[in-house]
Image (spheres, grey):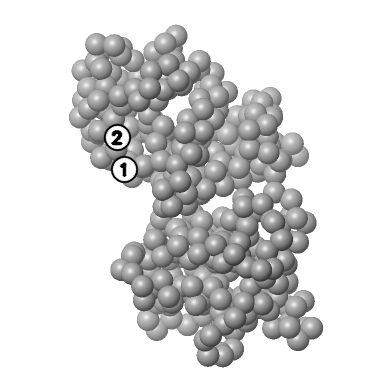
Amino acid sequence: MKRSTYFDYIEEKLMILSYRIKTRGKLNILNLNIHSEVFYTQLLNLLFDYSFVNLNALKQNAQGIDLIDRLNKVIVQVSSTCTKQKIEHSLSKLDTTTYLGYRYLFVALTGDGKELRSKMYPTIQGIEFTPLSDIYDVKSIVNIVLNLPLSKQKKLYNFINEELGPGADIIKIDSNLTEIITILSKEDLAIPYESPEINSFEIERKIEYNDLVSSASTIDDYKIFYSKINEKYTEFDKLGTNKSFSVLMTIRKLYTNLCKENDSSGQEIFFQVIDNLIELIIKSKNYNGIPYEEIELCASILVVDAFIKCKIFENPEGYNYVTT
């Protein structure tokens, strides 16, 4: 079914872009934020039939907004910071004389805007802003895409395909995971031996227990590869190479070291484990030039798998999980 093909592709690409913006933001690499303003200009035009232009291209560092449609009198703030304070700050910078009679939209590149839609905000005289309908995040945009006519989905699909490239190739991902597992298995592991745990558990409960709410979407996105990783580990372990243990212990060591080295929150540590795993792969003498985007994807899959297998983060007290 074409509708399913278009939607799955669009949803995947927008989610991955959001994740990359969030991850790079933690490293203070902000070039994707700039490019995303241009990308979302065209995306919103296709999605809502608007005529937005990037105001920053006309007027550097425009106060409070990034996009403007003068024909339909709509202004937009596009931000990687999804907080009430960010919206209030943006509203406070608006020039009520210039934008009198305009509608204000807030588009979050990362994060969940659900709670923000129920908050109260200062009224800006002459500017329309209804939080319930005027705050967008990736999830709400994807939900709109789901219900679009097929012809419009196709236009979005073609646009995103040109901007962000073809969909994930499962065969390529599988091959890269194999290579990454091989790389990690050859690393020197200076930690005691212990049997790997291949377990299933209530993921949501563990997320809440470790206060990983902001990481939940990433875990949810990549947990679908759990069986694929198990399949690959099983293939290697049948040959006696025990690569599953090596990879899981590498990730566990990264996590343990991060817990010892700083007082970061669980959510920060979760993404730091992914970042440090990427760095470890790239610096390895076995690294063979896999593109960064693919390493980032595969590293995320491996870390989520380690989370599911109870190698990183604590299990809730008294928790009984089922061996699979």
- How many callouts does the rendering have? 2
Looking at the picture, which amino acid does disc 1 mark?
A: Thr
Residue sitting at x 41%, y 41%: 80
Looking at the picture, which amino acid does disc 2 mark?
A: Ile
Image side of residue 158 versus residue 268, left or right: right
150 or 277: nearer the eye? Answer: 277
Residue sitting at x 74%, y 50%: 169
Q: Between marks 1 and 2, how big is the CA–CA gap? A: 7 Å
Could you say where residue 295 lies in the image, as x and y percent from the top left?
Answer: 63, 57
Helix, strand or loop for disc 1: loop
- Residue at mark 2: 87
257 or 117: nearer the eye? Answer: 257
* Residue 83 tag number: 1
Q: Quadrant of residue 96?
A: top left
Image side of residue 240 versus residue 268, left or right: right
| Above-or-below relation of 163 to 239 | above
| Above-or-below relation of 23 to 65 | below
Whether residue 164 is visible, yes or no, is: yes
Residue sitting at x 33%, y 38%: 117
